[in-house]
């Protein structure tokens, strides 16, 4: 059901953008004024000397005006014309980003994108439409070292498209057999999860058939103590859970959430596998907490020769945490979990800073949220500088009051007993006696229990109720509503988890499903090609609260990212010192922001004295950091030069602020051999890990994997470099 609900929301979002785009495209007369820069006409080629192209390109025009006055009149007719489809001035021949077809050809060095119907550079790579990719996958059989599979390894964002087979063992014996066969055939073995790492952390796109990728999606450890999620010390506020490594966070939470247990910090979405979130760099957003791998107590692993080991000593765990699959196969994990009996999550209203856009006002806003809530995920619209926060907190139990309203009476000019009662007028009270009510109330369970306190000029029970006017409210009492509506019951929560798991059987193999509805893709493509990225951004920004509310009503577990998206979304990721966050955001707001998704960040803390992982990115220093993500859309049919250029611009800002790359996202933006801006093209020798970190990890890897069976992928080949075995 969720897949259908989210797809419907996504479709509505895209259709909204398309409708807005259509309204602008097909209006012959309007008051909207656009500049060349705002509409991406800076890409016009070879027209710099033409005042006509500079001044009139991409402005609205009317086909009824045969003199094309809005395109500059007769003096510009050799350069511009009014496009019959978009009702905008375009170049002759068509230039970059302008609509094209067989009778409206592109200029030199350009080609007409089949998917978007606009001119793009000839060298720009094609991103296949989703349905074409899936059709190709179904008919592909790949083999390495005699091991064959119909499932081919690709990263979710398609940065890596390989010919490596993905095999799915079901138990220890099958997994051991795969390791031994691969070793005998001279292949490397690489564990894979939901494939959401951007770089080729699992495997790279080589033509060699020398890598076997292992998915644990169907795998169950042969040891009964690790075969299913089991809570240890259940009932305590702090406990632990043993869980198979191939389980997704969704599957884990289906067991622990109905019992009111949570991971101490968690990702935005539940799509990742357990091995994925502890074996690579993955963070949450809990204030004062760090990466998820900090909470690993033990790991059950299979080594290069098929033997099983339990790693539970800190001096070894620090190598296995965030080890990128370079040491062995993590088959199960024991994680710390904490009990949250009254967990709630929701959104705070999108707002501009009360004290204005300055460092002091920004710090005041963040610190206010930090004081009130346990975790937060922030989204910002760079155009308006409005910030929206998804927040989490644990509501405290309130003792049942010893008195009810009818026990309170008016006596000697006050409500008695005064220790428990107070004057609280409500609309309709006929006497002061009616307005005497108890001061100590249990948490309200519905909106009717939220009323207006006329003396305090706010809603009563302010910890639970707030003023939320809706059309049709006749009194202030009616406008007082619960901040957090009643959470779902345990039974409905279990039903929701079961439905999610049944609807998404490949979540731990291929990650978030990408909708193959061309209408959604074309809607984004249409909006992007006429410069409506800002409309898309603002629509997404406004849609977040409704997505959070759906997630709250379903399972109230803090996870937001849906299990279906209309398009793949590449993410540039960096960690920056928290005290430099405002300066970074301020610089980004001064760019001509062309991306179609809001900026996002969460707070992460590190403690070098308690270093939990040898391969923590950047040998990061103690203190609080902001984990920032810059997101765009990948449109099938063409690669947006604008978005990749903007990634490069923003990465420069992040690096200058002392930023450290997030190893699961885009970083190292630079030119490839075709002259296109791509990720991982410009990575310095110590941009990711220091030499100290590399030396320590290599030494341990040489000891636990003496034949280098697992030493492959981007980290091994490019960052840590080859080792002599």
Image (tube, rainbow, N blue to C red):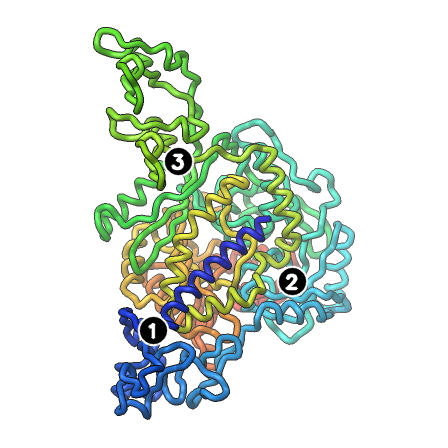
- Is label 3 in contact with label 2 (beta carbons under 8 Å)? no
CA gap, disc 3 and disc 2 = 55 Å
Total of numbered circles in the picture?
Answer: 3
Judged from the image, the secondary structure of the residue bearing numbered disc 3 is loop
For mark 1, does the 10 Å Cα neighbourhood hold few (<14), some (14 to 19), or many (20 or more) residues?
A: many
Residue at the spot x=46%, y=46% of the render? 548
**Can see residue 602?**
yes
Q: Along the polypeptide, which appears first: circle 1 or circle 2?
A: 1
**Residue receiving disc 3:** 483
**In the drawing, what numbered circle is on residue 39?**
1
Give the vertical position of 506 relative to 635 (above or below).
Answer: above
| Residue sitting at the far top | 412
Left or right, 708 with reference to 673 = right
Q: Nearer the viewer, residue 132 or 154?
A: 132
Q: Give the percent coordinates (x, y) of residue 584.
A: 31, 58
Above/below status of 435 relative to 592? above
Whether 174 is drawn above or below 675: the answer is above
Where disc 1 sits, the SS reads loop
- Asked if residue 456 lies left or right of residue 625, the reply is left
- Judged by depth in the image, the label closer to the viewer, 3 or 2, is 3
Q: Are marks 1 and 3 in contact (CB under 8 Å)?
A: no
Task: Please name the residue that numbered disc 2 is placed on.
Answer: 708
Q: Does residue 274 show up?
A: no
For the point 49% across and 42% down, the residue is: 558
* Foreground residue among 414 and 537: 414
């Amino acid at each position: 059901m969720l897949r259908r609900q989210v797809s419907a929301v996504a479709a509505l979002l895209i259709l909204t953008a398309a409708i807005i785009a259509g309204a602008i495209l097909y209006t012959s007369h309007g008051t909207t004024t656009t500049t060349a820069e705002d509409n991406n006409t800076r890409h016009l080629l070879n027209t710099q000397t033409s005042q006509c192209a500079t001044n009139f390109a991409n402005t609205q025009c009317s086909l009824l005006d045969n003199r094309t006055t809005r395109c500059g009149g007769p003096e510009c007719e050799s350069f511009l014309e009014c496009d019959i489809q978009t009702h905008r001035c375009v170049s002759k021949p068509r230039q970059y980003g302008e609509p094209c077809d067989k009778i409206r050809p592109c200029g030199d060095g350009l080609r007409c994108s089949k998917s978007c119907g606009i001119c793009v550079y000839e060298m720009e790579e094609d991103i296949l439409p989703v349905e074409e990719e899936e059709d190709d996958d179904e008919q592909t059989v790949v083999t390495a070292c005699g091991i064959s599979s119909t499932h081919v390894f690709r990263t979710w964002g398609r940065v890596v498209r390989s010919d490596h087979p993905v095999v799915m063992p079901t138990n220890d014996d099958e997994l051991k057999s795969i390791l031994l066969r691969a070793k005998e055939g001279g292949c490397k073995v690489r564990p894979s999860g939901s494939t959401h790492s951007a770089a080729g952390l699992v495997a790279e796109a080589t033509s060699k058939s020398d890598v076997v990728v292992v998915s644990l999606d169907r795998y169950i450890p042969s040891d009964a103590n690790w075969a299913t999620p089991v809570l240890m010390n259940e009932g305590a506020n702090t406990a632990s859970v043993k869980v198979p490594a191939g389980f997704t966070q969704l599957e884990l939470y289906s067991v622990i959430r109905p019992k009111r247990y949570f991971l101490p910090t968690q990702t935005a979405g539940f799509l990742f596998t357990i091995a994925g979130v502890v074996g690579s760099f993955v963070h949450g957003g809990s204030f004062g907490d760090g990466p998820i791998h900090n909470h690993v107590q033990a790991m059950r692993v299979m080594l290069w020769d098929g033997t099983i080991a339990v790693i539970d000593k800190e001096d070894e765990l620090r190598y296995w945490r965030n080890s990128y699959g370079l040491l062995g196969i993590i088959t199960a994990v024991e994680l710390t979990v904490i009990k949250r009996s009254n967990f709630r999550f929701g959104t705070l209203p999108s707002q501009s800073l009360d004290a204005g856009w300055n460092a002091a006002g920004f710090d005041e806003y963040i610190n206010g949220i930090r004081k009130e809530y346990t975790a937060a995920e922030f989204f910002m619209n760079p155009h308006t500088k409005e910030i929206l926060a998804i927040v989490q907190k644990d509501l405290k139990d309130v003792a049942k009051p010893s008195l009810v309203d009818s026990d309170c009476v008016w006596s000697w000019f006050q409500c008695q007993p005064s220790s428990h009662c107070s004057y609280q007028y409500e609309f309709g009270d006929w006497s002061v006696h009616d307005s005497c009510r108890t001061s100590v109330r249990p948490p309200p369970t519905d909106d009717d229990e939220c009323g207006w306190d006329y003396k305090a000029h706010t809603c009563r029970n302010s910890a639970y109720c707030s003023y939320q006017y809706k059309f049709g409210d006749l009194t202030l009492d009616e406008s007082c509503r619960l901040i957090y509506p009643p959470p779902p019951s345990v039974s409905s929560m279990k039903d929701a988890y079961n439905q999610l798991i049944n609807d998404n059987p490949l979540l731990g193999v291929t990650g978030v499903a990408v909708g193959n509805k061309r209408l959604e893709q074309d809607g984004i493509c249409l909006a992007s090609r006429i410069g409506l990225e800002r409309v898309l951004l603002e629509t997404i920004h406004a849609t977040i609260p409704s997505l959070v509310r759906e997630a709250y009503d379903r399972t109230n577990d803090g996870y937001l990212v849906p299990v279906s998206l209309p398009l793949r979304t590449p993410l540039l990721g960096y960690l920056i010192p928290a005290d430099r966050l405002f300066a970074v955001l301020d610089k980004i707001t001064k760019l001509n922001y062309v991306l179609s998704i809001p900026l996002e960040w969460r707070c992460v803390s590190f403690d070098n004295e308690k270093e939990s992982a040898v391969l923590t990115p950047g040998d990061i220093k103690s203190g609080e950091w902001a984990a920032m993500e810059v997101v765009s859309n990948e449109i099938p049919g063409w690669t947006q030069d604008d978005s990749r250029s903007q990634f490069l611009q923003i990465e420069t800002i992040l690096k200058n602020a002392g930023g450290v790359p997030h190893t699961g996202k885009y970083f190292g933006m630079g030119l490839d051999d075709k002259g296109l801006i791509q990720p991982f093209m410009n990575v310095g020798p110590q941009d990711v890990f220091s030499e100290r970190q590399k030396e320590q990890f290599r030494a341990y890897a040489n000891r636990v994997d003496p034949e280098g069976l697992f030493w492959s992928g981007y980290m091994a080949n490019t960052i840590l470099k080859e080792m002599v075995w």
